[in-house]
Image: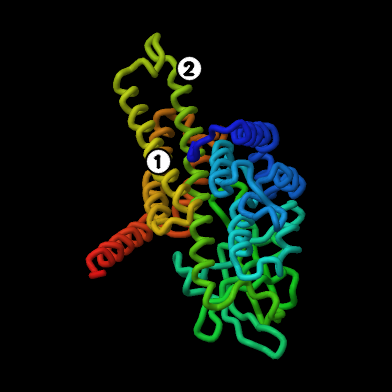
Amino acid sequence: MTTDVTSPESLLFASTAQSFLEKEASLARVRELHAAGTSFDPQWWQRAAELGWASLLVPEELGGGSVSGNGVADLALVAEQIGRTVAPGPLHPVSTVLAGLVDAEEPERHSALIESLVSGESVASWAVYRPGRGWAPHDPGVTASATGSGFRLDGVADRVEAGGESAVLLVVTACDGALRQFLVPTDAPGVTVEPQRSIDLVKRYARVEFSSVEVDASAAVGAAEQTRDLIARQSQIAQLLQCAEVVGVLGAVVDMTVQWAFDRHSFGRPLASYQALKHRFADLRIGLEACRATTRAAVVSVATRAADADFNVSAAKSYVGEHASPMIQDCVQLHGGIGVTWEHDLHLYLRRATLYRSLYGTPEDHNLRVYALAEEAATDELEPA
């Protein structure tokens, strides 16, 4: 686990999530959704929300709460379980939006939306990507101009997860030389949502165009001077969820591969009995535990809002992103020819890990981020008191 699960309440929460996913979001179900051209079943997501998945980052006074009292850790636990079945659903975008809403000034102004998201009745997503750009949350593709009663939005955002299924988008904009975020209903006049293809079987994304979209002043989330901090927090949550989910992916794939080696025989003995393969399994296990350790460090720092949270999240995103796909490719090779067939489930896991490698920053992006943060910390230490 990417988090310590020791209390009876946390153990029950983890086992309930696992049972729910095995029953209602199995690999067979993922294939059914893909065949139907569907990302996820809204009723399924409401049942998941009833288990408390969407409430974990929301304080009790706003209708949320977590089992352990550590919402970030509980959320990472759910994400890891989701990775084991590459389950569908808008856990990432909903959690990322909620992270911004509850940290903003006067969050009670958005209490109706928060309540709707916590209950699973509606879905929201974060529109932060500029078309044609990599991860650059401070360089949005949407602008906001002040009007007499609010703001007017123009521009385009893409790679919006569950954009076609969302009722509301939290849009990052450039506004009068500053960054601002606004809540925009997807059915508002001037909003056009176009689906984008994804390598994943059930993860859906969208390109969203804003053409003279008018919003009230109440649609702003947080003050202008707070927006960069909100974006930083939302980025941490989005990246952390990806890492935790990929740890679940790797755990399932490694277990699957080891079991295959015990079941498959060659020259009258299990493949798992051959020393050369044992070494490869050991390497896979070491890689898995390293991914888990870096992710766990990120979970702790984000949960406690530590000063090194950005550093630890980028370190995890870099390490997990760099190592996950090659590890799964090794598992494909260890399966032999069956591992590259459509009927085998390995490619479902490889697709999810490959997708997450590039979203919210590539390993190369985060390598540079880790270096920059380390240099900054070293400079601060050298400055006289």
In the image: residue 8, left or right of residue 296 = right
In the image: residue 185, left or right of residue 248 = right
Q: Is residue 268 above or below residue 307?
A: above
Q: Nearer the viewer, residue 181 or 353?
A: 181
Q: Nearer the viewer, residue 255 or 317?
A: 317
Q: Which mark is residue 263?
A: 2
What element does badge 2 sit on? Answer: helix
Q: CA distance from mark 2 to mark 1?
A: 30 Å
Name the residue: 48% across, 29% down. 338
Q: Residue furthest front?
A: 385
Q: Amino acid at mark 1?
A: Ala
Residue 368 can be seen, yes or no: yes
Q: Amino acid at mark 2?
A: Asp
Q: Which residue is mark 1?
A: 293
In the image: residue 321, left or right of residue 223 = left
Name the residue: 68% across, 75% down. 219
Q: Answer few, some or many: residues within 10 Å of disc 2's Cα (few below 14, many 20 plus, some between 14 and 19).
A: few
What element does badge 1 sit on? Answer: helix
Looking at the rendered image, the quarter that the C terminus falls into is bottom left
Name the residue: 48% across, 22% down. 259
Q: Position of residue 260 (x, y in %)?
A: 47, 23
For marks 2 and 1, give the one nearer the viewer. 1
